[in-house]
Each structure stands twice: as C-alpha cells, then as structure tokens.
Image: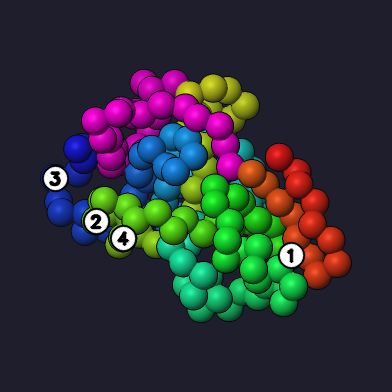
Amino acid sequence: MVRSKSTSRFSSINTLVVLAQTDTTVGFASQSHERLANIKSRPSSKPFIKVYSNNKQYLKDKNRVPKNRKNLLRRSIKTTFVINQKSFRINKERNNSQVFRDLTPYYSTSANENGKTFNKEFCESKADIIIEDNDGLHENSSSTLIKLNSIKKVKIR
C-alpha cells in the first residue's frame, strides 16, 4: 500500500521523502540529502548512505572499488560499505514499488529522530510517501558497516 500527501502523480520525485520497510529496517529514502538532514536534525556535512540497485549502477556513478575487494562487494548481503569517506549499499532485492525503481540511486537513513528509536507517528508526519506492505513497518537490526581500502577491511558495526 502506498499513501501520499501529494495529489499529483509523483511529479517531482527527486525531492520527495519516502518512508518504507527496507531490507534491514524502516528507513527514509530520498534523492535530496538536504531534506533527509533537515528531518533528522543533523549537520549536512555528515554523509548519508547512497543506495544503488546493482554493482553496474554504482560503477556508472564514477565510483571505484579496490580490485581485491570486488568479490566481497558482489557477494554482500545487507552490508554498507565505506570507501574514501563515501558510504553506499547495493540493494539487490527487487522492490515491489515503482517509486523505488524510479528513485535509484537514492540516499537512505534510518527512520527515527537523531539518536532515538523508531516512532511511527514522527516518521509518518515527516514522509511525503509511505510504502507499507502486509507486515507493516517494524524496526529490525541495521546493516553491517565495513570500511574498505585496498590493504585492509575493518568492520565498524
């Protein structure tokens, strides 16, 4: 089920904030990291995770992966990577919503106030589009966070 405050047919999807159940937890998604920073009340200098639908899309965005880490990236599930101070995820799960197919790549963050737990009323008040399936929105564990370079791999979370 998709609920929207807008009466138009998602004409300016680039600036909309979507609330949805991701492959890990409930999250906000948008192509505007400024809107997400405003919702989360966090400095705009702190980066957000950028989500790509596949490896080719990530590489097409002029990003590089160390040669000896490509296999790790290709086989990763529910993992966020940090390379050269940029964080990203490859979400290979096919989204059932046309909104997410039109939105990729997009910025993502957990759906909560900065430093707090999931609050459905807060999240629904901040989102322009709410995507909810039969299971509803529920908080799960966050993704694994790994910092990579060509020499070492460090698990942060």
Front one among 36 and 132: 132
Amino acid type at mark 2: Gln
Magenta stretch encompasses residue 72: no
Mark toward the viewer: 3 or 2? 2
CA gap between label 4 and label 3 equals: 20 Å
Residue at x 40%, y 54% (from the top left corner): 93
Near mark 1 (Cα within 10 A), the count class, few <14, some 14-19 or many ≥20, is few
Residue at x 24%, y 56% (from the top left corner): 98
Amino acid type at mark 1: Asn
Magenta stretch encompasses residue 137: yes
Give the percent coordinates (x, y) of residue 155.
76, 47
The segment highlighted magenta reads 119-143
**Residue 105 seen from this side:** no
* Residue linked to disc 2: 98
Residue at x 38%, y 38% (from the top left corner): 21
Residue at x 36%, y 39% (from the top left corner): 20
Give the percent coordinates (x, y) of residue 132.
27, 35
Report helix, strand or loop for mark 2.
helix
The N terminus, quarter of image: top left
What's the mark number on residue 7? Answer: 3
- Height in image: 118 above or below 5? above
* Residue linked to disc 4: 101
CA gap between label 3 and label 2 equals: 17 Å
* Residue linked to disc 1: 84
Label 1 close to label 2 by CB (< 8 Å): no
Q: Residue 67: name its quadrant.
A: bottom right
Label 2 close to label 4 by CB (< 8 Å): yes
- Nearer the N terminus, badge 3 or badge 2? 3
Q: Residue furthest right?
A: 151
Front one among 140 and 104: 140
CA gap between label 2 and label 4 equals: 5 Å
